[in-house]
Amino acid sequence: MTRTFRTTARPAAPAGRAVARPKTRTRTLIPGQNGAGTVRRSVLPGGLRVITETLPTVRSATFGIWAHVGSRDETPALSGATHYLEHLLFKGTERRSALEISAAVDEVGGEMNAFTTKEFTCYYARVLDADLPLAIDVVSDMLTSSVIDPAEVEAERGVILEEIAMTEDDAGDCVHDLFAHTMFGDTPLGRPVLGTVDTVNALTRDQVARFYKKHYDPTRLVVAAAGNLSHTEVVNRVRAAFDRAGALRRTEGAEPVAPRSGTRTLRAGGRVDFLDRPTEQAHLVLGMPGVSRHDERRWPLAVLSTALGGGMSSRLFQEIRERRGLAYSTYAYTSGYADCGLFGVYVGCRPSQVPDVLKICREELESVARHGLDDDEVRRAVGQLAGSTVLGLEDTGALMHRAGKSELCWGEQMSTDAMLAKITAVTPDDIRAVAREVLDRRPSVSAIGRLTDRQAAHLHEAVA
């Protein structure tokens, strides 16, 4: 049975005066079966979107609010502001202190967190279904009524500087930031989401507060929830929370912002970025431009990435680790943005193995660009990607993530069956076509580690 919560009646209008409230527009996007998997979308007055997926058989619910702002929306002087703001929204509102925000979710055994990417930010709480009203109230309060206290701004600055230091100590993580710089240069997509020590130290409370006011109005937000819930009651509680803060009145009559789109040309290949660090391993990313998240080629490219470096049976894992014993960790990946994308191969290995590892990576990419994959490789990769996609949607947090990101990035919802249909429709011919278009280019490489001059020279040879 779908759980319902108690609702508080609105005060009656004064006698003789009718109050007409702007209407909420609601649609069922995915019907589901027997009430399970039903996805509904409402647009509130003021442009706030609410997406829910109902799962009557679970006892949990995840509630999140997604903001249409990421690090690519920052000027150089504001680098790191999106992530800084993410931290600060946990530090107190007009109704709750930072401790009260944390304690409210902790005391019911829930989990609350947030994350910032280059194109969006998400705040969420996972709780028992009975505690969903609490999660809605707390997270909505954070998003609409943060006070951005000057003392908290200074205290959190130190926390973020430690987070930057922690990331820089992890070369396997840091090399992906370096690769973004290699491919995008000194542009918003090429800068780290966290910012740098210099930019974080320079950010002021007023700058962050203006950034908050500009990017967190209801037209730029998406509410997503999944679990044992009632769509109508989620909408009512969200509307009450935003009304309490006066947020919907400020944008009444406005429509939601459209998903990002466009095209972008990346820098030419053949680039090398190398950071000399005293690490035991060298960390390498070799790659090239991929496709945007709006490009239908993203489906065969995802299958191709899986076949090349998506598991223990993949080409690169078998050749680099199993046959040669050159590395412990190697994988391929894709990153799709609104107007462009990346394809990359990561390897962590001893510095002495760098020449052989780069040679293998380049040869495998060139071979697939010329010949594609054989039928068995495509079949295995399709099955692996299809299975992992379904298994990755087994909890309410993952379903909330899919609903929110889909609305923000595409403005539509795709059912699990529709996603599986896209994956299983990929053919060897599709793989050959996307391999020629993506892999048959001069790559670039980023590396972090302690390399000799001779070893470092192989970085340039790999992209020649």
Image (cartoon, rainbow, N blue to C red):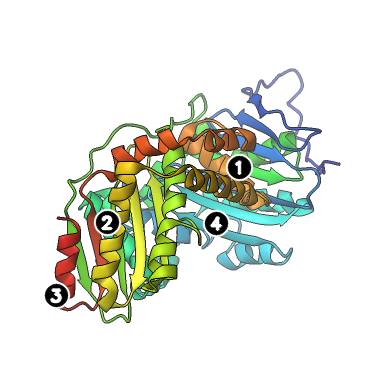
Dot 3 alpha-carbon crowd within 10 angstroms: few under 14, some 14 to 19, many 20 or more? few
Whole-angstrom CA distance, mark 2 to mark 4, is: 53 Å
User: Looking at the image, which residue sits at the far right?
Assistant: 1
Dot 1 alpha-carbon crowd within 10 angstroms: few under 14, some 14 to 19, many 20 or more? many
Residue 67 position within the rendered picture, expressed as x and y whole percent measured from the top left: 47, 44
Amino acid type for the residue under numbered disc 3: Arg
Residue under numbered circle 4:
93
Amino acid type for the residue under numbered disc 4: Thr
Locate residue 385 relative to residue 41 in the image: left or right: left
- The secondary structure type at the circle numbered 1 is strand
Locate residue 255 relative to residue 63 in the image: left or right: left
Residue under numbered circle 3:
454
- Seen in the picture, residue 16 relative to 200 is either above or below; the reply is above
Looking at the image, tell me whether mark 2 or mark 1 is earlier in sequence order: 1
Whole-angstrom CA distance, mark 1 to mark 4, is: 21 Å
Whole-angstrom CA distance, mark 3 to mark 2, is: 18 Å
Q: Nearer the viewer, residue 380 or 200?
A: 380
Q: Nearer the viewer, residue 13 or 366?
A: 366
Residue under numbered circle 2:
362
| Residue at the (26%, 71%) spot, across then down | 354
Amino acid type for the residue under numbered disc 2: Arg
Residue 144 position within the rendered picture, expressed as x and y whole percent measured from the top left: 53, 47
- Numbered mark located on residue 224 in the image: 1
Locate residue 433 relative to residue 423 in the image: left or right: left
- The secondary structure type at the circle numbered 2 is helix
Is residue 96 visible to us here?
A: yes
Nearest to viewer (mark 3 / mark 4): 3
- Quarter of the image with the N terminus is top right
Give the quadrant of residue 237: top right
